[in-house]
Amino acid sequence: MLSYDFICRAFVAGLALAIASALIGVPLVLKNKSMLSDGLSHTSFGAVALALVLGIAPTWFALIIAIIASLLIFKLENKKAKNSDAAIAVLSSGALAFGMIALTLNKGVAIDPNSYLFGSILAITKTDLILSILVGAMAGLLYIIFFKQIFAVSFDSEFAAATGIKVKTYETILAVACSVVVVLGMKICGALLISAFVVMPVLGAIKLAKNFKQTILISVFLSIISFVLGFIASYILSVPAGASIVVAELAVLTMTSIIAKI
């Protein structure tokens, strides 16, 4: 399997994103902001579609739009705006619908929307590989340097603010990091499945872990295992990598639930 260059690129990039998504997913799930990744994935698809129609670099354009959208979503939730969940749903579904229509009407765009909706390992470029490795490294570095701050913000934002921690700064960093993971992960898992890539390993880790550090470590471990199993299965069975990875994550989550009950 690894004798093919494009598969090697996809494997390494996916491994880096699996680590990054698990690290970023922990505070998101603990802060009950799991829907952020889902909303961003749909918004990113709309941005990619628009970029393809306009003939500009889709990844960079989608990153900018996703970051803006993530900051807007955080602002709505932090202000506890009325119907903020509904606003996120409207934003994500609207962007997804707009993207599909834009790609369908523009006959000059020779690209299959399914590659962005469900992922495609053929779409991984050397630039994507480098960005994925950098994102994985930066996510790990973020925890090493700001572990106490992330811990405090994840469990009680009001207490963290009272102790002098700049909560909005760390939430902004979290939002930006989630945007990057979602946009880069779209090529592996697709816009419709990337949210599971971020959330499922964390849910499994929470069932087994006894503290915050264990949650982080187990989440990363489960994410890596799920990615490797799903990636290999997709090659053997000739099925989409994104769907295969998510099914593997679902199987791992089920297994952790059984272990937790035992």
Image (cartoon, rainbow, N blue to C red):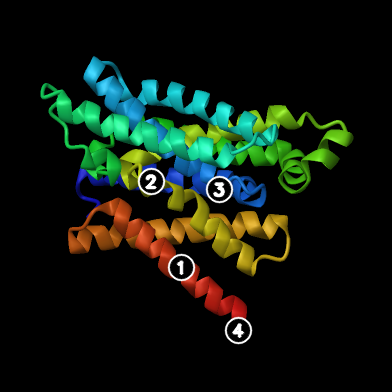
x and y, in percent, of residue 39 in the image: 46, 39
The secondary element bearing badge 4 is classed as loop
Which badge, 3 or 4, is on the more N-terminal residue?
3
Q: Nearest the camera: 120 or 49?
A: 49
C-beta proximity under 8 Å, tags 4 and 1: no
C-beta proximity under 8 Å, tags 2 and 1: no
- Using the rendered view, name the quadrant where residue 158 is placed: top right
Gap between marks 3 and 4, in whole Å?
Answer: 27 Å
Left or right of 167: which side holds 83?
A: left
Left or right of 47: which side holds 201?
A: right
Gap between marks 3 and 2, in whole Å?
Answer: 20 Å
Which badge, 2 or 1, is on the more N-terminal residue?
2
Q: Nearest the camera: 47 or 96?
A: 96
Disc 3 marks which residue?
A: 34
Taking the spot 62% from the left edge, 68% from the top edge, the residue there is: 207
x and y, in percent, of residue 223 in the image: 48, 56
Going by the numbered disc 3, the residue's amino acid type is Ser
Determine which of the numbered discs, if any, sits on residue 262 in the image. Answer: 4
Total numbered labels = 4
| 4 shown above or below 249 | above
The secondary element bearing badge 3 is classed as loop
Quarter of the image containing the N terminus?
bottom left
Disc 2 marks which residue?
A: 14
Tell me if mark 2 has few (under 14), some (14-19) or many (20+) residues whose alpha carbon lies within 10 angstroms of its own. many
Taking the spot 63% from the left edge, 49% from the top edge, the residue there is: 32
Which badge, 3 or 1, is on the more N-terminal residue?
3
Gap between marks 2 and 1, in whole Å?
Answer: 17 Å
Going by the numbered disc 1, the residue's amino acid type is Val
